[in-house]
Amino acid sequence: MPAMPRARRMCLPLVVIGLTVALAPACGGDKATKDTKGVKPAPGNKAPAQTPEATPPPTGETWTWALPKGLSAAPVVPADNPMSAAKVELGHQLFMDKRLSGDGSRSCYSCHQNELGAADGRTLALGAGDKPLTRNTPTIWNVAYHQNGLYWDGRAPTLEKQMLGAWKGGNMGAGDDLAAKAKEIGALPEYTSQFAEVFGLEPGAEITPDHIAMAVSAYERTLLCGDTAFDQGTMSEAASRGWDLFRGKASCSTCHAGDNFTDGQFHDVGISHDAAGQLLPDADVGRGKPSEVEADNYKFRTPTLRNVTKTAPYFHNGSVADLTEVVRYMAAGGNAKAPGVDQNLRNTQLTEAEIADVVAFLGALECPGSLQVIGDQSVAGIPEAAEAADPAAP
């Protein structure tokens, strides 16, 4: 790829704080896990003033990360898609542009809205042409930190590959001829000079799907969540009790670990089976499909818990609408009747008061940031999802 041109200063502020996703506390083990955040925040302190948006300062061709409090390391950036302010700005515009979709009806933002925790609030995702998909939409916050691939089943190895898959498939519905769509977008007057500058192209050079995927992925790597009440040490007394339970008696941190509150692994918590342990009709195979390993069937990624209070409904199929119910289910050991339920899960015997404290702690992970919206991104409410009819899925 040609050498990157000198980055021009951004004219659009970018979010570097805020996050979320689906699911909830998790797995067992008899001992409390190590406190990965240091000393427990003292309850009752007043929260410092929050800065809802910040712009990472670019210095020439080098991107300098302005990490929010609570994130200890910058996202890994692939060598073939280096960061620059101009590329992030271009990706931000493309993320908000409905013309990328097959029918011009949806942008990436359509599934990742501010008011819904950077998800969509639906049981199952809705694709181009209002076509229901087969999985719940995960949050976009901190997506750059996902390990072992993207999507609930980890089938896309990089953000760039995930963007191409979502763009081509049911989410955006652009179809098999992405080259034609990329050429169409690249020829728009408002984009022509930006693509040339960002990728060092000659005027009039054809824009490819990879150009678009790289720009959008660069923008997505800036969507970072931190600076929550937990990170600032300003949790309530209930949330502080919940934090003790989370890493102790409830053993949630066995699977929801680290800065992003996820181990990046895939687990079967029994959601694909009914209370009697029978496989649900048309149950999603999950990780087993891309891995082609039978032991991976019905396993799904451990989601981040940052901003989880804003991203209902929960689990890969959106089957539980209430966060308290999710905590109760996981604290009881998930679905013990499911034949492949994760061995870490056990009944932790939390009381209702303790469950309420864990939920209070999860509330302390709410992110203060928001995506800056460009253009008309209005949506017509959040209709109840219909039966899934498309194999494409988040």
Image: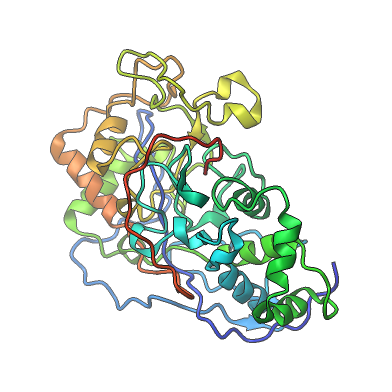
Give left or right: position of 249 versus 158: left
**Residue 227, quarter of the rendered image:** bottom left
- In-front residue for pair 208/161: 208
**Percent position of residue 152, x then y:** 52, 40
- Residue 181 point in image, percent of width and height: 70, 61
**Nearer-the-camera pick, 247 or 95:** 95
Relative horizontal placement of residue 177, taking residue 323 as reference (left or right): right
**282 in relation to 101, above or below:** above
Image quadrant where residue 64 sits: bottom right
Front residue of this view, candidates 75 and 149: 149
Image quarter for residue 297?
A: top right
Closest to the observer: 123 or 307?
A: 123
Please state if 106 lies on the left or on the right of 235 as rendered.
right
**Could you tell me which residue is drawn at 45 percent across and 44 percent down?**
303
Residue 353, percent from left and from top:
14, 40
The residue sitting at the left extreme is: 353
Q: Residue at x 51, y 69 (%)?
A: 67
Q: Is residue 78 at all visible to an observer of this figure? A: no
